[in-house]
Image: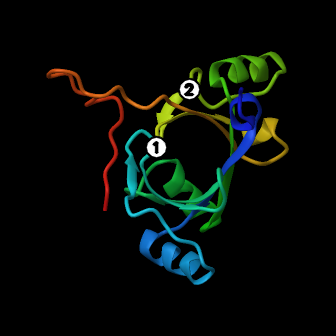
Amino acid sequence: MVSDSESKTILDHIAVVVEDLDQGEAFYQSLGLEFDQEREVVPSQGVATSFAPIDWNSSLELLSPLADEGPVYDFIKKRGAGIHHVAFQVPDIHAKCAELKELGHTLLYPEPREGARRRLVNFVHPKSSKGVLVEITQVLAPPEEEDEGESDEGVFKGDSR
């Protein structure tokens, strides 16, 4: 039997840009959220991330720029800290990207890219989504168990605190 999360679009996370992950976590912890122990660096996006589960599937993601450049840094300089995007998990990101393109929506990337938490990601440009940056995600299959000298190194690289 196929579970709901395998057959339909569901809320994956809401992303909030903060200048400092420690300070951002402290505020949301005061609301009762608990953040994952490990933070993740996503070099292709130029960010460090921290996730706090909200329910069985969705999370709050805090994003902080790694340097004084890149899209998240530019977002902070232009708009200040705040909500950055809403992410929806889909069963097949390639099919969803093709469908969105066929409907005339503009995607930020020609093909999905590897993002945080073992997900493929792409974004719908805010001009195509009524002013909201929308991320679509698909969970990647877990890496195979290491077999006799084989390694999953390179399948996903993230840093922890």
**What secondary structure is found at the residue carrying circle 2?**
loop
Residue at image location 77% in from the left, 48% down from the top: 132
Where residue 45 is drawn, which disc sits there? 1
The alpha-carbon separation of the residues under discs 2 and 1 comes to: 13 Å
- Percent x, y of residue 131: 80, 48
Task: In the displayed orientation, state which residue is furthest to the bottom.
Answer: 30
Task: In the displayed orientation, state which residue is furthest to the front.
Answer: 1
- Percent x, y of residue 84: 65, 56
Residue at image location 32% in from the left, 39% down from the top: 157
Residue, disc 2: 112
Nearest the viewer among 78 and 8 is 8
Figure quadrant of residue 92: top right
Tell me if 116 is positioned left or right of 40 in this view.
right
Above or below, 78 relative to 104: below
Three-letter amino acid code at disc 1?
A: Gln
Tell me if 112 is positioned left or right of 79 in this view.
left
In the picture, which quadrant includes the C terminus?
A: bottom left
Q: Few, some or many C-alpha atoms within 10 Å of disc 1 (few <14, some 14-19, many ≥20)?
A: some
Three-letter amino acid code at disc 2?
A: Pro
Above or below, 143 relative to 101: below
**What secondary structure is found at the residue carrying circle 1?**
loop
In the picture, which quadrant includes the N terminus?
A: top right
- Percent x, y of residue 117: 47, 44
In this rendering, which labeled residue sits more in front, label 2 or label 1?
Answer: 2
- Percent x, y of residue 18: 53, 67
